[in-house]
Amino acid sequence: MLEVKESTLLAYHLCALTQMKANASASCLTPAYLAFNLRCIKLFIIAVIQLPLALPAKAAQYNLQTPATPIAQQIYDLHTWILLVCLFIFVVVFGFMFYALFKHRKSVGHQAANFHHNTKIEVFWTLIPFLILIGIAYPTTQTVFAMRNMEQADINIKVTAFQWLWEYEYLDQGVRIVSNLATPRDQIDNKAPKGEHYLLEVDNPLVVPTNKKIRVLLTSKDVIHSWWVPQLGVKQDAIPGFIHEAWFTVEKPGLYRGQCAELCGVGHGFMPIVVQALPSDEYEQWLATKKVASLDAGVAVDKTYTMEELKAQGEKVYAGRCALCHQANGMGVPGAFPPLVDGAAFSAGAELTDPLEKRGFWKNGKIVLGPKDQHTDIVVHGISGTAMQSFGQQLNDLEIAAVITYERNHWGNKTGDIVQPAEVAALRKGAP
Ligand code: HEC
Ligand SMILES: [Cu+2]
């Protein structure tokens, strides 16, 4: 497209040109001025040629995202079709209206017609909208039925929403991944420039093979969330106590990004979705490594870990799962999320301080670390009625042991306590 500078120049000289013409000034015939005007005309022609070429690109910015699944394509086409129908109605109705206003205006002495019934016109204006409705309803119904057709799925994945992350469980495969926001905190806090995929990037994407029918079963552990990936044509609510289904078949390998689309609390903007589509063989490889990883985590229960090993692992778990609320420095957010630093003060409403007080870790407005088995119990079972969810289902024994060891021995907390995975396993057995 033309540069702004050039367009301004163009506008300026077009003005000058018309002015001179109006003044019939002879000075516009000097060679310098003619060259000037030629340049103006050239720019004008370029603009006229470039406009239609640039329009589709510009329009794409405002259109739906490029479809990546057959359903998304159907939705896209449906949207375009209905928009064209609307445009057609708009042009016809307004065209007719303006034509009638102009043609039958008073100043040309038009006399109003005076009739009551016209069967032909009445049939016509009932039939036309009826046909338009059929023309919209038929493709829409087809698309909705196609979206709802869950038959013959190749892979079933259970998607569980949490405040504020997604968990994916490959049913029949024994693989479970937890998908967290990966945008660095500094970008969110405006301390660093924002990246290309700001708030649309995760640590572990949902990995799927291309050209397979993937069925997702959606539910939530706390409030209503919504799993939305525009390019896949899926937008489905995840509601606690219910299971909803959706499906998609990705055609091209790549990364497809989406977001939670149901206001679900302060972290709503921080639970993006990334789907990574891989060719089948690469997907199988990925799945194999994941299976090994989850086996490892299972065996590790009997092992005794050192403080350093646990803290290193715990730091990762904390950054991924706890820092969103309790903050990376462990200081929490006043009024919402308690600090986990021994002796740090916390002020909040009674609905938060009462459960804290009841448990007895909270002394004179300050958080103190309680006995380690109680601490473990909080992380495994959560605190009902508050945002502190139960992590027992989401983290394995090693991860829980590690994050507790980390919390108890970091940010100046010096309990010296080590929690081993076996202790977590025992606690789980004792209180299922
Ligand atoms: C969604 C926000 C959120 C996340 C994520 C979260 N917590 Fe909490 N946490 C809370 C809230 C809110 C409380 C206070 C509940 C109350 O009022 O009793 C809390 C309380 C706690 C307490 C009790 C503090 C005390 O001294 O009584 C511990 C321990 C704790 N969280 C550990 C963790 C760990 C470990 C993780 C990560 C595995 C985590 N939390 C993730 C919100 C969160
Ligand atoms: Cu959400």
Image: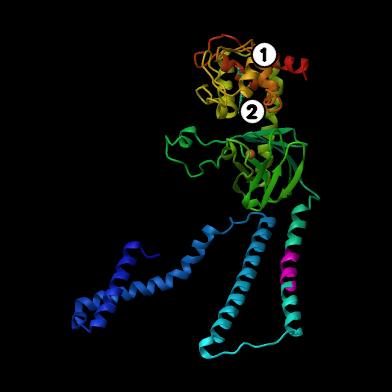
Mark 1 nearby-residue class (10 Å; few <14, some 14–19, many ≥20): some
Of all residues, the one furthest to the right in this rendering is: 151
Q: Nearer the viewer, residue 268 or 90?
A: 90
Q: Read off the residue under disc 2.
A: 387
Kindly identify the residue that appears in the image at 76 percent across and 44 percent down. 244
Where is residue 15? Give x, y as percent: 29, 74
For the residue labelled by badge 2, is the local secondary structure a helix, a strand or a loop?
Answer: loop
Decide if ligand 1 comes within 8 Å of the CB at mark 2. Answer: yes
Q: Nearer the viewer, residue 239 or 63?
A: 239
Q: Is residue 137 magenta?
A: yes
Q: Read off the residue under disc 1.
A: 374
Q: What kind of residue is marked 1?
A: Gln
Tag 1 near tag 2, CB within 8 Å: no
Where is residue 274? Give x, y as percent: 60, 43
The correct choice, above or below, for 422 with respect to 206 in the image is above
Q: How many marks?
A: 2
Q: Nearer the viewer, mark 1 or mark 2?
A: 2
The correct choice, above or below, for 27 with respect to 62 in the image is below
Q: Which residues are magenta?
A: 130-139
Where is residue 206? Give x, y as percent: 65, 40
Q: What kind of residue is marked 2?
A: Ala
